[in-house]
Image (spheres, helix red, strand yellow):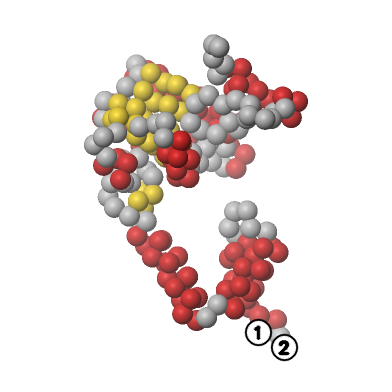
Amino acid sequence: MSKNDFLALTQLEDSFASLPGIGRKSAGRLAYHVLKMPDEKAELFAKAILEAKKNIHYCEKCCNFTDKKICNICEDKMRDVSTVCVVEDPRDVGAIERTGEYSGKYHVLHGSISPLNGVGPDDIHIKELVTRVPKENIKEVIIATNPTVEGEATAMYISKLLKPLGIKITRLAYGIPVGASLEYADEVTLSRAIQGRSEI
């Protein structure tokens, strides 16, 4: 049996391995799992991927994923239209929504500024945010980028762009998780915890 006999399997493994967080071993397991699927199930799996790629796109207002022109959150008349929370990833919207503590709108950047990875301000959705703020009469922008070097750099960049507009700009406070030890906390987390301290 030649190498070419397994070309389709290798391509399938390579496809899974190209996904974030999937190593070669996991990619192999997923590929073999797909091969063991009944044809009907495999076709539904492939169809789900194609349908998502075809029908899911960016919301025209907040850049979150949606299958409509405007996402459900942007369309919700009950939400505070004067506040926008800026996040790096669509999954961050879900995380904040699960807290039940926030009732404003969102803006999804789809990444953070990372010169080492070749990602500049024009590669993420910052321009759309700057255009949106005066257009929608936004009063406060909460910057909720991740507490990483890239997230902090992105927050600072956005802050500098928005400050001349005379709006309130806040940064999501990050601190030490409950039950964690200070000695194991990294510098960025400790720094954010000190900055976000509150009176007791």
Give the labeled residue for mark 1: 5
**What is the crowding at mark 1: few (fewer than 14 residues within 10 Å), some, or many (at least 20)?**
few
Q: Is residue 25 left or right of residue 143?
A: right
Q: Is residue 72 left or right of residue 37?
A: left
Which residue occupies 26% across, 30% down? 135
What quarter of the picture does the C terminus occupy?
top right
Spatial CA span between label 2 and label 1: 7 Å
Give the labeled residue for mark 2: 1
- Camera-nearest residue between 184 and 148: 184
**Type of the residue with mark 1:** Asp
| Picture coordinates of residue 96, whole percent (x, y) | 45, 37
Q: Give the structural element (helix, strand or loop) at label 2.
A: loop
Q: Give the quarter of the image for residue 27.
A: bottom right
Is the residue 122 above or below the residue 36 in the image? above
The count of marks equals: 2
Label 1 near label 2: C-beta < 8 Å? yes
| Picture coordinates of residue 129, whole percent (x, y) | 37, 33
Which residue occupies 35% across, 19% down? 167
Q: Give the structural element (helix, strand or loop) at label 1.
A: helix
